[in-house]
Image (tube, rainbow, N blue to C red):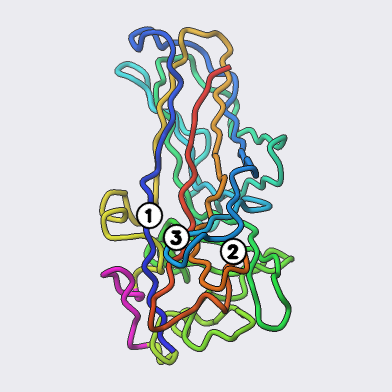
Amino acid sequence: MKNRFLIPILVLMLAFLFGCEKDNNSGSIADVKLQVTFDNSAVNKSSVSRTELSSETPDSYYVALKSVKLLGAEGTEDVYLFNNEKLSDSPVFNFTDEATVHSLLQDAGIPEGDYHTIELEVYYLQMNIGISTARNGIERRNFRIYMSDDAQTEQGLHQPGDMTQINEAGQEIGWLLGEGQEPNMDPVTPRTSAYTYNGDGTSWYDFAGKSGENFGPFGGLDFWASVSQPVYSVKAEFDLSAKEGATIILDLNVSGCWKFEDKDNDGAFGFGDLDPDNPTSWHMELPTISVTVE
């Protein structure tokens, strides 16, 4: 059975701190921290109609970052907080609640200077969501979506947009929604079985005008054409406002970030939503990133 997914991408929106004038942005930075806002009140458990997308806020959220860099104005050199040679060496930051805060500062310190932007290179995002199965009802499962192309950079297995299932031991066990997907929504492996007709490894599915050979079923051409590849990066601005010993706080709001067409109205994405004659829509929305200085 062939499924074609029409998956919209919302452009990543950046919320900035409004403060003092930009021409006085010099100061020292004591730390750069990362946190996640879940805001479960925004969860929409089921769709009102078959054409609207439902949303779910994940129980947990992981971010794997290849690098974090502070960009300086003229006269201030850019500074890496860390920069791993390989995507596969990316440190993973785990968030299960809003009280969890991770420091991104892994080196000795940040030279004083005029910094205005932070740049993140993202390897993958991961979340825990409900999946509706034919045999076991709704199960909580961990899914990872790859933003960067490790197949191109280091002979890895993942193309940008791939969505894979992760077991409780943190091991990747297969791709979501491949040819021959069982009613229990078991993951499919290898990748060529997931994204080719009948798992033949040759005839690739087309996802929004992109061959499954080079992309997973995530997003549209406009999104991928607008970002750097093979390593995905995003920038966010901030204003030090001449604060001494400032701490920069990056907040990822993941409220309702899992979007899906709930065709059977059971409140979770699963086997009852797959329809080859009426293609099913689903995607993981990119988090809104806000930046504050304390």
Residue 267 horizontal side relative to residue 240, left or right = right
Residue 243 horizontal side relative to residue 206, left or right = right
Q: Are marks 2 and 1 in contact (CB under 8 Å)?
A: no
Q: Residue at x 53, y 60 (%)?
A: 47
Q: Which residue is mark 3?
A: 52
Q: Nearer the viewer, residue 225 or 148?
A: 225
Q: Quadrant of residue 18?
A: top left
Residue 227 horizontal side relative to residue 258, left or right = left
Residue 254 spot, x, y in % from top left:
56, 45
Work out whether residue 268 can be spotted: yes
Q: Residue at x 32, y 16 (%)?
A: 75
Q: Identify the magenta region.
A: 202-213
Q: Nearer the viewer, residue 58 or 77?
A: 58
Residue 53 spot, x, y in % from top left:
47, 59
Work out whether residue 86 can be spotted: no
Q: Amino acid at mark 3?
A: Glu
The quadrant the N terminus occupies is bottom left
Residue neighbourhood size for the residue with mark 2, other residues' Cα within 10 Å, grouped as few (<14), some (14–19), many (≥20): many
Q: Which residue is mark 2?
A: 143
Q: Earlier in the sequence, mark 3 or mark 2?
A: 3
Q: Residue at x 73, y 66 (%)?
A: 169
Q: Residue at x 55, y 69 (%)?
A: 164
Numbered circle sitting on residue 9: 1
Label 3 vs label 1, nearer the camera:
3
